[in-house]
Amino acid sequence: MEIETFKNNFGIVSKSRKIRDLIDIAMQVAKSDISVLLYGESGVGKEVFARAIHSFSPRAKRKLVSVNCGAIPEGILESELFGHKKGSFTGATNDRKGYFEIADGGTLFLDEIAEMPLTTQVKLLRVLETHEFMPIGSETVKKVDVRIIAASNKDLQKEVDAKRFRQDLYFRLKAVTLNIPPLRERREDILVLAEHFIEIYANKNNIPKPQLTKDAIELLNNYPWPGNVRELKNTVETAMALTKSNILTAEIFRPLLTEVRKNDPNRNLPVHVNKSADAIDREIILGALIEIKKDLNELKNIALKNQQVVNPETQNVQITEVIPLDEIEKQAILQALNFTNGNKRKAAELLKISERTLYRKLKEYEIQ
């Protein structure tokens, strides 16, 4: 028997039995103040579930504050969470409320909590246990009433085993754990989500709702969606912005898909392949590393092209042009972001750096 499409006002749209079961649990725990831990790959919709839980809770009329722990530099995360007093550190020109105080009476959603430094984890645990905290530089304890929903794309038990995450905090957070499956494991949701995003975009931009052709539907259904629901949404919106007709065909979508490699006839392979998602991801990462290495080699050759050896015996070299290392690093980051269509998590993996380091580098090199 075909499962009816579930749809609510908070962005959850699904025909998947797995998602329907998670929704039932989420709505049940929403009525309490118990902590909820959401697992899932980047882009599966963890924040959508957090919003749904908050909206069905007694705290719905108060704020839901979302914090990406991986996107905030380690040095200022504590200040962002707990606030600070004027003059407590260089640059603290005014008193500032932290996210805990802003979310008082409501819900605080801590995304990518595995990226939180151990020192901050200690203070977070204390707030959860005592409902008290002190802003940086303050001698006054503040009371706070906040419900915590945390999320991670990493296995926190493995992070605990590796001594990167506190065991006591892990036990405190995982009172209720929801594992949101990736889009490739619930393919029945692909078309209903695509239609949902098409309808939203059409209504928002006051345009007729376009139709998906049969070949477009087949392409979308067979694509592995490494970026999950977020990638699907971005792809649909871009396709609608680019189309000149009221029809969305496979030809419009194909250049927008991450794994359909552009500008190389040797990579123009069919999207539907009989490989596991992990094997496909490994191929993507390997290909990206090869491309980055090529770019670095090209930059190295440019840096050395005007070198002239004056005395080979003493290896004295006259260099007329050298490319700074920071410029090489910047180009590598741009290449990785271009390859992943702006997916910063994937780009960080390709560059073998943490997502927090990537965000710091983006700010340092003023890369938008």
Image: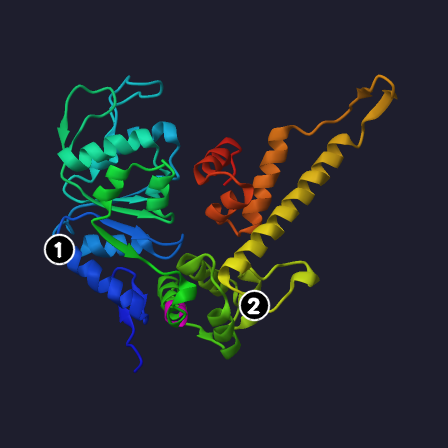
Residue 233 spot, x, y in % from top left: 42, 60
Task: Confirm whether the magenta stretch covers residue 150.
Answer: no
| Three-letter residue code for mark 2 | Val
Q: Is any atom of residue 177 visible in this view?
A: yes
Residue at 50 percent across and 38 percent down: it is 353
Up-down relation of residue 193 to residue 43 (above or below): below
Camera-side residue of 16 and 323: 16
Residue at 63 percent across and 59 percent down: it is 262
| Three-letter residue code for mark 1 | Lys
Kindly report the distance in space between the C-alpha atoms of the residues bearing marks 1 and 2. 43 Å
What count of labels does the image hold?
2
Residue 197 spot, x, y in % from top left: 38, 65
353 sits to left or right of 79: right
Q: In the rendered view of the protein, which quadrant contains the N terminus?
A: bottom left
Span of residues in magenta: 190-194
Closer to the chain start, of discs 1 and 2, is: 1
Residue 74 spot, x, y in % from top left: 38, 31
Circle 2: element type: loop
* Residue at which label 2 appears: 271
Residue 176 spot, x, y in % from top left: 21, 52
Q: Main SS type for the magenta part?
A: helix
354 sits to left or right of 154: right
Circle 1: element type: loop
* Residue at which label 1 appears: 31
